[in-house]
Image: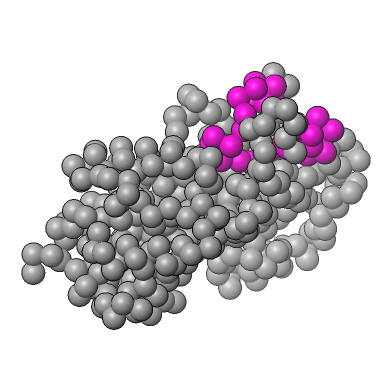
Amino acid sequence: MKANIYDVAEKAGVSITTVSRVMNKTGRVSQKSIEKVNAVIKELGYHPNMFAKGLANKRTHIIGVLLPAFDNFMFPDTFTLEYLRGIQEVVRSFDFNILIINSQSNNDMDETAEYMKLIDGNKIDGLITFEGMMNEEYLKLCKKRKFPIVFIGDDSEETYENHIMLGERECYTEILMYLKKFNHKEICVVYYVEESMMNEKIKFFEGLFKELNLPFDEKVNCLIDTGLMVSFDESVALHIEKGHASAYVTECIEYAQTVLNGTLRLNKKIPEDVSTISIEHSFEESELLYPKIDSILMAGVEIGESAAQKLMRLLSEEVNIEPRIISTVKSFGSVKNLKQ
C-alpha cells in the first residue's frame, strides 16, 4: 500500500504540519526533525500525487482564501503574507493548493460575488475568510449546501460556525493595559481597514477603550488608513506634531515605521517625546526597526495554519488543530513611564 503523509508523520514521531514544513522548506523546524522526516520520506518512498487524488474523489484540490479588497493597497502588512504562508503549509500536506480571492463588491447582491461563482461552479472545495466579509444571503446558501467554510475573527462562535479566534482583542487589550501601567491615557491606534468596515472597527476600539476606562475620541484615538489616502504618512506626522497622543499603537511594523519616520521629521525622540508599541506578525520582526520598539506577537502563520487545519478536518481529513498561544509584550524601552 502506498504511503501517505499520516504514515510519514507517525513513523517520524512529528505532526503533519512539521512534515509539510520539511517538504516545503518553510517555517521553523529543528535540524533533528528535518533529518528524521527526510529519512522516513526516503524509507517509505512517499510522493504526493495531487492529480490522481483529485480524480479519485472528484475534488478540485483548491481552497479559496477570501481577502479584503486590495485594488489600491495590496497586502498592507506582513500579516497577510504570513497568514497565507500558514494556510499553504497545511493544505499542501494534503495535496491542496490555494486560490486568493479579492473581496471587491462582495456585498453587492446585484452582481454575484466572485467567491460565489467559484462555489457554484465547483471550482473550490472550501473557503477560508474573515468575519463580516460574506453577505448574509450567501452565507445562508453556503450553509444550506453544507459547503465548508472557516471564519477567522473575534466574534462569538454562535454567530460563525467553524470559527478560529484571531486574537486581535487579546493583543490590543494586553497593549493598552501595558500602556496604562506606564501611565498613558492619550493613546492613538494606527491601523488599516476597508472603508466599508471603518465604522465597525471604530466601535471595536471604542468598546475596548471604555472597558479599560480610557478616554476615547475617534478623531484623536484612531488614525485610519483605508488605502485611498496618498498622504497617510503626512496625516501621522501631523497627528504627532499636534501632540494629540503620548503613545502610538500600530497594528503592524509597517505603520510603526511610519510613526518612527514622523518623529524623525519632527526632531522628536522615542521614547522621550513619543512612546510607540506595535503588533508584530512574524517572530522578532520589530527588532528590524531602529530604534527597536516594544511589541507583541500575533503570528499570522499560526492563524493561517489553525484555519487550514480546521478546514481540512471539515473535508474529512484527519488532522489535529494545534493550539495557539497569545504572547506577552516584549520590551525594548520604546514606552516611557510618564510618572518618572
Identify the residue shown where x is 53% and y is 46%.
194
| Residue 132, placed above or below residue 217 | above
Q: Nearer the viewer, residue 36 or 19?
A: 19
Is 247 part of what is drawn in magenta? no
Identify the residue shown where x is 55% and y is 28%.
161
Residue 94 visible: no
Q: Nearer the viewer, residue 158 or 30?
A: 158
| Residue 203, placed above or below residue 289 | above
Residue 303 screen position, x and y as percent: 53, 49
Relative to residue 169, is residue 6 drawn left or right?
right
Q: Nearer the viewer, residue 27 or 177?
A: 177
Segment colored magenta: 115-143
Relative to residue 146, is residue 281 drawn left or right?
left
- Quadrant housing residue 126: top right
Residue 52 screen position, x and y as percent: 90, 46
Q: Nearer the viewer, residue 25 or 319?
A: 25
Identify the residue shown where x is 39% and y is 75%.
261
Relative to residue 121, is residue 178 drawn left or right?
left
Identify the residue shown where x is 60% and y is 24%.
136
Residue 46 screen position, x and y as percent: 80, 58
Task: Identify the residue at the far top of this view.
Answer: 144
Is 125 part of what is drawn in magenta? yes
Relative to residue 103, is residue 278 drawn left or right?
left
